[in-house]
Structures are given as C-alpha cells and as structure tokens.
Image (cartoon, grey):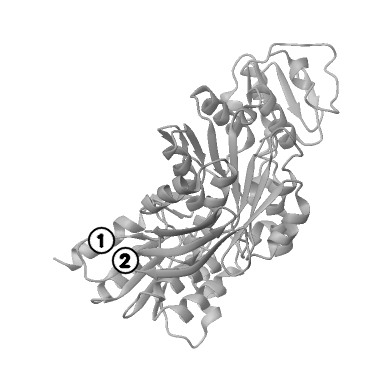
Amino acid sequence: MKLHTLLQYLYPYLPTDGENPEVTSIENDNRKVRPGSLFVCIKGYTVDGHDYADSAEKNGAVAVLAEKELSLNIPVIVVKNTKRALALLADFYYGHPTQQLHLVGITGTNGKTTTSHLIEKIFSDQGKKTGLIGTMYTKISSEIFETKNTTPESLTLQKTFKKMVDKGVSSAVMEVSSHALVEGRVHGCDYDVAVFTNLTQDHLDYHKTMDEYRQAKGLLFSQLGNTFNKPKFAVLNADDQASVQYINSTAARVVSYGIDCEADFQAKNIQMTAAGTSFTLVSPLGVHQVNMKLIGKFSVYNVLASLAAAVVSGEEISDIIASIEEVEGVSGRFEAVNAGQDFSVIVDYSHTPDSLENALKTIRQFAKKRIFVVVGCGGDRDRMKRPLMAKIACELATDPVFTSDNPRTEDPQVILREMEAGVSGRKYTSIIDRKQAIEYAVNEATQGDVILIAGKGHETYQLIGKEVLDFDDRLVAKEAIEEKMK
C-alpha cells in the first residue's frame, strides 16, 4: 500500500514533501522493522519509541509516524497522538477486519473471561468458526496463542482479526479492559454486541478514582456506532448502578439482564448445591429452566450475560441453554483440585474485593466445616484494596491465610502489613511464601473443610522482583495434598 493512500485515513497530518514509498508493514517495535516498514513511535511507560527512530531507519523503514519532528532521511509524519493513529492505520491497513466479523466485546471488573468463554462455546456449538481474545489466551478456530495483556495493543489486535478473517472465522469474542479503552487500543474495532458484567473496585492505581474507572468502561458503549443496516446491542447488568450511565451514553439497542432488578433476561428461583446451580429464566422468549454445573450467584450473572448476548446475536434460546448446561467450568475460575482428599480445594482468579466476597459467599452456602482462604494482593498495583481484601477474608472465612500474590518490585512484607492493617484484632495467619501458605492450609484442613486459593487462578507464574517464576496454584495444591496423603 502506498504511504499517501494509508495516510488518507488520518486527518490532520503534516505532509511528507511528495515522497510516496510502498508500505509493506506497520511496526511499533524497531526490532521488527524490515525494508518497507512504516515505523510508529509510541511513548510507553518506560520506553519512548521516538528514541528508536534512527534504528528503525537503519533497519529499512520507509517512513516514521511520530508526535514531533525528527531528523531523518525518510518521511516523518507528525500527529498529535501516535497510539490513536496506530489503531486507525492498523484497522485500515488490514482491510477493516472486524467489519467482516460478528464481534462481541465484554467489559467489567469481574466475569469477563468466563462470559467470553461461554459465548464462544455457544457460537462454536452452532457450527460457527470462532475467535477468542482474552486474559488466558487468543484462540483462532482451533489454534491457541499466548497473550500478554487482556486486550492486546492495537497493531497486534488488528493483525489477529485479519488472521481470523483469513482462517474463515465468522464470530469473535473478546475481553475489553479499561486500560485498553482509555489508551485507544480498540479504536477501529466494529463491535456488534457490547456486554457489561459489573463494576467494583480495581485498577485504582491507574484510574485514580471509581468515577474515572466507571467512565473508562463506558467508552465501549459510547463508541458503539449508529447503524441501521447492522444493529448494535448493549447488554447491560440491571443490578449494577453503572448501567444507568451506560444506557445514557450509548446509541445502541439496550438489552438488560439481572437477578434482583427487573430485566429483559432475569433469573428467578435460584437453587445452589456443591454440584451446580439451577434457576428459572424469564425473558421475552418465555420461561425456561436452566440446570448448570457452574456454581454461585456470580456464575448466574455470567450465564445471563452470555444468554442475552447470544440471543441478540441470533442464536436460539434452546440451543443456548443446551450449550451452557454442558459447561464444566473455565480454567482457574472456581476450579476444583482433586487428588483423593476428603476436603475441598478450589482455585479462583478472585483478585478484587468483590470477586473474593462472591467466591467466599458461594462457598459458605455449601461448606459444612471450616473455610480456609489463601489470599494476597499484587505489588505495584491498587494499594487501597489491600485492607479491604483482608477484611473480607476475615469476615467470610474461618481461617484466613495472607500471603504473596505477584509482589513484583514491592517488598511482600510491606504488602502483608497493608493487608493486616484492615483486620487489627482479627484472627489470621500470615505466610509470605505462597507455596508454604498453600501447604499450610492443606496440612491444617480436615474432612469436610474447604480451601479457597484466591487471586491467581489460571496463571502459571509468580512475579517476584523482575523475575517471572514458574508457579501454578493448582499444581502446588495437588502436590501438597499428595504429600499429605503419603
């Protein structure tokens, strides 16, 4: 594609003095630049791409997109915001791939991963070729790829959508983080359905206030376009107050779901056991019974969101329910660890106050004896939630165990002290080493007890300092159980 053809998609930009080279790729990493590349300078948290423009030119870049003038021998196109420009250029360069997909985006504090997997399964069960982008991985049809962020940066995102189109994918589902929305990573994405799960405290190290966090999530709904030949839907949680703002900020058709408040898709008569959950679904499509293997009120919300999103996507309600009732669970989401022990061990990604509370309240509904919870708080992240997490653990578990959870560059002892500050005078155990904390809970547990290992879920690593160490709560727990049973 000629440079001038590509730049038509941006306005305004500084002219390039008539030079019009052929652009064969777009890159924002100078190490990936090859002859024919357009290099986009991005200011990151630790690295400024402008400092690598010379290197990009040496590697064969034919032009550079920047936020300031640079002294180079190739065209330099100056824009106000290279992140925003990159998102738009990538969408254009790869042929607007999301316009060729039925795209569902899911945002919210908790439940994005489970909801996205449920929707993807519903579509797949109906014979559709699907794509999935989220916290755990990227999936294109049957191929799975690792991901670094819940929502990839814009260039990777559009490349991925292009691969999906090339592989014959017709329906894609993705998690959309608040960081990605604020940073414009999803600019150029043509969503057909946008889903809101819930809003509770998280990421205040980044957004600073809950109001800013709420507004960030709302960008997904305000960016849903006005179209008449291709309807857009906002699927909103009627039980969450933030939905009121999102209703007012979107031009899309609004469909609601909920439990406590009246909604288009509402769950009634919820019954829960250690083996699963059943409820009566009341919707414009009639009354249906749902008997699922997933456990907990939070699972009912995830299922309702998935149901509503699938219905507005054109799927039959009976087919949707059949798919949902088959689901055993999602990796690291309320996942049981069984090694022949006579007590229960559950690993869950509950890393926010609300998700921890939901998980523990669910366990309290079927636990017969003691409840252990092994929980920590991440380093270099929202410090305000640390005493809240500890308070919830002490209130809802009989045996709280505080430990490390990706301390990163912070002193884990300091993190534990900030957790302990919220539970002065309460009973708890603090063990810095996460492996030792899990082993302690397993060795203390007796018949009929329940252990919740919270915070990391599907993660297979521990971030300590600058190191990424192998660590899987599920494997550590299983090994501890097997050792105990010898």
**Hey, what amino acid is under mark 2?**
Val
Residue at which label 1 appears: 338
**Hey, what amino acid is under mark 1?**
Asn
Residue at horizontal 47 percent and vertical 75 percent from the top: 393
Residue at horizontal 52 percent and vertical 26 percent from the top: 163
Q: Secondary structure at mark 2?
A: strand
Q: Is residue 254 left or right of residue 172?
A: right
How many residues crowd mark 2 within 10 Å: few (<14), some (14–19), many (20+)?
Answer: many
Residue 71: quadrant of the picture: top right
Image quadrant where one finds the N terminus: top right
Residue furthest out toward the bottom: 425
Residue at which label 2 appears: 345
Residue 262 position (above or below residue 468) = below
Residue 245: quadrant of the picture: bottom right
x, y percentage for residue 293? 37, 58
How many residues crowd mark 1 within 10 Å: few (<14), some (14–19), many (20+)?
Answer: some
x, y percentage for residue 30? 61, 27
Residue furthest out toward the front: 286
